[in-house]
Image (cartoon, rainbow, N blue to C red):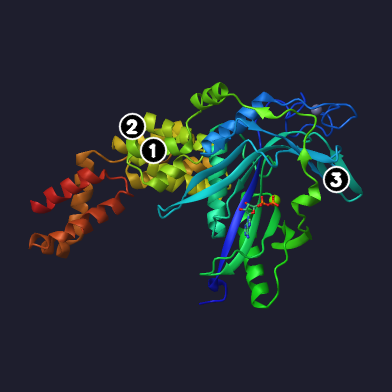
Amino acid sequence: MSTIEKYESVIGLEIHAQLLTVSKMFCRCPNRFGSLPNTQICPICTAQPGALPVINKKAVELGVRAAIALNCQTHLESIFARKNYYYPDLPKGYQITQYEQPFCTKGEVFVRFKNGDEKRIGITRIHFEEDAGKSNHESYGTLVNLNRSGVPLIEIVSEPDMRTAHEAGQYLRTIRGILRYADICDGNMEEGNFRCDANISVRLKGTEKFGTRVELKNINSFRFVEKAIEYEVQRQVLAVEDGEKIIQQTRSWNSAKNITEVMREKENAHDYRYFPEPDLPSLVISVEWLDKIRAEMPELPKQAAERFKKSFELSDYDAAVLTSSKEMAQYFEKVVAESKNGKSSANWVMNELLGRLNAVGKEIESSPVTAGQLSELIVKIDSGQISGKIAKTVFEEMFATGKDASSIITEKGFVQISDPAALENAIRKVIESHPSQTAEYRAGKIKLLGFFVGQVMKETQGQANPALLNELVKKLLDQ
Ligand code: ADP
Ligand code: MG
Ligand code: ZN
């Protein structure tokens, strides 16, 4: 057993998700990304003296929607708290958040893996929080942009239930999928509206007690999540093996150097001097409103996956992938609706399209092949116009150029040969040029049939209609 295999990692994630509201959490400024710096601010979100916060009802609704989607308990009464710290992009000197009485606790989510396994990850709590502004560090100094100040967030805190970097990555993808599906959050890590801190510790396999945790920040892309956690786990294992004590600290992922670096020694809750927010009453959610939000819940990925599984005979994993985002599910559903072939649609999307999209770093929304174009290709295979083999070549061309299957087929002369006379000609030629194999076949070695079929396919550049070809080869050899 290698050194690293003697250890087990324990991982818990804290996810910050910006809510898809029109305006901010406590004022009427727009909640919009990418505007000119400091153009979406007001006395409330810039902390002018005397300005008072008022809660945004839509933010609460979206938070409750998240609570329902993540199988949590929603509390009818919760309170806001001040988390005090000083930072240039935090003009109030505190963040309004929830601390002792969050609106939501005790949930769970099920994460699906490629081998079909499923794992339950517990959710400790979800609470509301306002975002801070943003400090942009330039060569000549630091610029503060308060457009983000007061943007509504939910923080989703998981139990320390994950045991590998991959589990953590899949958990994060699952949460993102759910939040995007239910129009709660955009889930864009690069734009910062979906962020994650990873708490990581290691312990010897077989031991119960958790090790001291390190909190990892600044993981600002999905590509880095697993890499950053893997690096940190390895760093901790090597340190422990060297007899070092892990210190509770906050570290930052440096994606240029591929390492984690110390940011600060971990602060404790008492450092923040949390106390109940005096400017806001407690948050009261009525039973009627909760019921209404529940009744209006959109379909969630798990429900869509069940539906797909039943209708199209998909595996659990395939169904999970095809419902990993609403765009993906919509794309797939459109292909099926037009091709009328669920199994084949799933195969083309999973095996041909997603691999290629992945390779060029594109999402399904910007696929060069539209759902309509893919279904047209599948119809052409099913109607016998082209063989499955040719279809792959056509698809490659479609992906590269964005052209329709029919124009590529015409341009390249890729039509399937289904004319018996033309095929018989080609078959006769092959029979004539292979006298010994023909004799062997006729003497009873019938498994040579495949050889002849293969030769004619070669002769016709793969364009022969396979079913017809088989039938005719047999007929002519048996004569
Ligand atoms: P804080 O708010 O100070 O970061 P929390 O108690 O809320 O602390 O825990 C934050 C996260 O750390 C949770 O996701 C939890 O699952 C995780 N966590 C707690 N203890 C450990 C540990 N020993 N190893 C790894 N993760 C841990
Ligand atoms: Mg934390
Ligand atoms: Zn404002």
**Left or right of 330 in this view: 435:** left
User: x%, y% of residue 461?
Assistant: 33, 49
Residue under label 3: 87
**Residue placed under numbered mark 2 in the picture:** 340
* Residue 288 appearing in the image: yes
- In the picture of the structure, the residue carrying the numbered disc 1 is 306
Q: Amino acid at mark 1?
A: Glu
Q: Which mark is residue 76?
A: none
Q: Earlier in the sequence, mark 2 or mark 3?
A: 3
**Structural distance between the alpha carbons of marks 2 and 1:** 19 Å
Q: What kind of residue is marked 2?
A: Lys
Q: Does label 3 or label 1 sit earlier along the sequence?
A: 3
| Residue toward you, 37 or 407 | 37
Mark toward the start of the polypeptide (2 vs 1)? 1
Q: Ligand 3 is in which quadrant of the figure?
A: top right
Describe the element under mark 3 as helix, strand or loop.
Answer: loop
Residue for point 43% across, 45% down: 350
Q: Residue at x 59, y 33 (%)?
A: 75
What's the CA distance linking mark 2 and mark 3?
A: 58 Å
